């Protein structure tokens, strides 16, 4: 059964290029030329991944992602000609899982899609996750007011369920099951995205910031996820 990809992009040349290439790769691709049509098509079918351009007529990609996130945790990849940190931070902050700058390589896009779908499949079937082998015998980890349920892929803080994305939970799990181990950004990317690190550290920075906002009392002065400047991050929850 072919994986279904929703491509929301207003540039017809890019649509034809991406759709043709991905269909040759075995994907079932549905294309929408604006954000409104993209949301309509999203509501009409089941998809395994969404690719969204940021700048589009009628409804921009950020709003499309926000509305998708209200309904689903499906993997979302942003593509945009604007390669600034602001665009990336805004997009990822609203729930995108990855970012690809235009112009892009078709091979790179295919690799990112494969990695996203692979991680999403592992998330929905946690017993098959590579990171599951790192989990301790006890499947519920407690760190003060923070409780992490590895079996159910959920977390609670002060008895309140945390709304974590798949990527946020995988990062949390990686840290919590490896206390005091230092991870570089390249290592985090390889573990979580299961792909080679392209040196785009903003993807890591935004996900760490979003995770801290959900699990920390003071995200700017974190208790759990510590920054080792110039090296990476480590879990310091005792």
Image (spheres, rainbow, N blue to C red):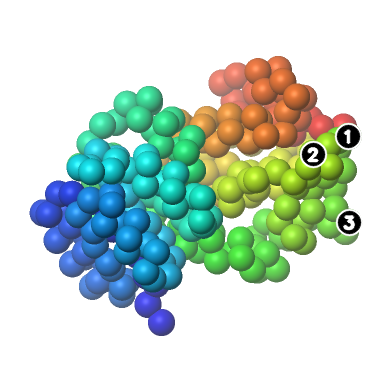
Give percent across and percent down for residue 89. Answer: 43, 30
Cα separation, mark 3 vs mark 2, equals: 18 Å
Q: Residue, x 23% and y 51% (percent of image)?
A: 34
Q: Residue, x 51% and y 56% (percent of image)?
A: 71
Where does label 3 land, which residue?
A: 138
Could you tell whether 181 is left or right of 57 in the image?
Answer: right
Where does label 1 land, which residue?
A: 144
| Mark nearer the N terminus (3 vs 1) | 3
Q: Which mark is residue 41?
A: none
Badge 3 vs badge 2, beta-carbon distance below 8 Å: no
Of residue 227 and residue 98, the one placed in the foreground of this image is 98
Where does label 2 land, which residue?
A: 157
Give percent across and percent down for residue 108. Answer: 31, 52
Q: Nearer the viewer, mark 2 or mark 1?
A: 2
Q: Residue, x 37% and y 69% (percent of image)?
A: 44
Q: Quadrant of the N terminus?
A: bottom left
| Mark nearer the N terminus (2 vs 1) | 1
Of residue 162 and residue 124, the one placed in the foreground of this image is 162
Could you tell whether 235 is left or right of 90 in the image?
Answer: right
The answer, for residue 178, to whether it is visible in the render is no
Badge 3 vs badge 1, beta-carbon distance below 8 Å: no
Badge 2 vs badge 1, beta-carbon distance below 8 Å: no
Most extreme residue toward the left is 13
Q: Secondary structure at mark 2?
A: strand
180 relative to 32, above or below: above
């Amino acid at each position: 059964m072919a994986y279904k990809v929703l491509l929301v992009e207003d540039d017809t040349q890019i649509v034809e290029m991406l759709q043709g290439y991905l269909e040759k790769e075995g994907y079932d691709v549905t294309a929408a030329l604006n954000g409104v049509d993209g949301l309509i098509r999203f509501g009409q079918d089941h998809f395994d991944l969404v690719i969204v351009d940021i700048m589009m007529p009628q409804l921009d990609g950020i709003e499309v992602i926000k509305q998708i996130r209200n309904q689903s945790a499906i993997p979302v990849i942003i593509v945009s000609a604007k390669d600034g940190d602001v665009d990336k931070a805004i997009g990822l902050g609203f729930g995108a899982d990855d970012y690809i700058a235009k112009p892009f390589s078709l091979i790179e896009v295919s690799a990112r899609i494969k990695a996203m779908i692979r991680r999403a499949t592992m998330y929905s079937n946690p017993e098959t996750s590579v990171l599951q082998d790192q989990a301790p015998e006890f499947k519920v980890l407690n760190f003060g007011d923070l409780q992490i349920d590895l079996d159910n892929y959920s977390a609670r803080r002060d008895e309140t369920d945390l709304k974590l994305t798949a990527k946020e939970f995988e990062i949390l799990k990686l840290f919590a099951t490896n206390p005091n181990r230092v991870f570089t950004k390249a290592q985090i990317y390889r573990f979580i995205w299961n792909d080679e690190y392209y040196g785009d550290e903003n993807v890591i920075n935004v996900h760490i910031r979003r995770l801290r906002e959900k699990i920390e009392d003071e995200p700017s002065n974190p208790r759990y996820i510590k920054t080792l400047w110039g090296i990476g991050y480590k879990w310091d929850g005792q």
